[in-house]
Amino acid sequence: MWSILIIIGIIPVAAYWAGRYFIYQKTTLALGQHDCRISTEDLAQRMGLVQKIPRSLRGKRHSSALAEIVMLAGLAVLKRDHLKAVSMRERADLFAMAIAPLSLLVAVFAIFVGKSIIISLVCVVIVNAIAALMKFTSMTIAKHAAVVGTKLLQEARIPRISDEQLIENCVKVLAWK
């Protein structure tokens, strides 16, 4: 019984992590470290992004950081028209980011208290499967935000066309982040 639940829970987790590795990480490693002639602050200003730029992206000039600014701009535009959908994506991102370490922490404490290891493992796998399914179901919102952000990027007219193409390729895979 428990092994069936583990297998059912591992399928979406494995699919999500395989997609993330082969689509997001490989593309980001290949294209994301190219230096562009525009900084994140300048790009945000040209695109009309009024929200605060995250500290981890300030002053960066590589294409993956610029792609995140484009995605933020796309989400900001979508948030005006589709608030519930964008909020669902943001909640899925936060849930997936927080649930993995918290579920492992709870499982370790459960094992220390004397609960069965297999039950603790099943709980970790099922909770992470729920997080992976939340990310899968909200992926279309992120892809739509990438399309909207790409249109904003084209309207922003950054200095080099090759930089624009690199940023566009990085934005397309950000839905898997």
Image (spheres, rainbow, N blue to C red):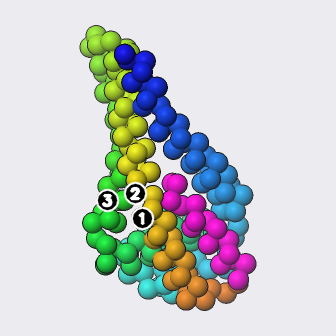
Q: Of the numbered discs in the image, which one, if any, rests on residue 39? A: none
**Label pair 2/3, CB-CB below 8 angstroms:** yes
Could you say where residue 39 lies in the image, as x and y percent from the top left? 58, 77
Q: Which residue is mark 1?
A: 141
Where disc 2 sits, the SS reads loop
Residue indicated by mark 3: 88
Q: Quadrant of residue 167?
A: bottom right
Give me the C-alpha separation between circle 2 and circle 1: 6 Å
Question: In the picture shown, does residue 133 fall above or below 167?
Answer: above
Distance from label 1 to label 3 (Cα)?
Answer: 9 Å
Rendering coords of residue 85 (x, y %):
32, 65
Image quadrant assignment for residue 37: bottom right
Label for residue 138? 2
Element marked by disc 3 = helix
Q: Position of residue 62 (x, y in %)?
A: 64, 68
Amino acid at the residue labelled 2: Ser
Residue type for callout 1 = Ile
> Is disc 1 placed on a helix, strand or loop?
helix
| Start-end of magenta stretch | 161-177
Q: Earlier in the sequence, mark 1 or mark 3?
A: 3
Name which residue type carries label 3.
Answer: Met
Residue at the image position 62 percent from the left and 80 percent from the top? 38
Q: Residue at x 51, y 44 (%)?
A: 16
Mark pair 2, 3: CA separation: 7 Å
Asked if disc 1 and disc 3 are in contact, CB closer than 8 Å, the reply is yes
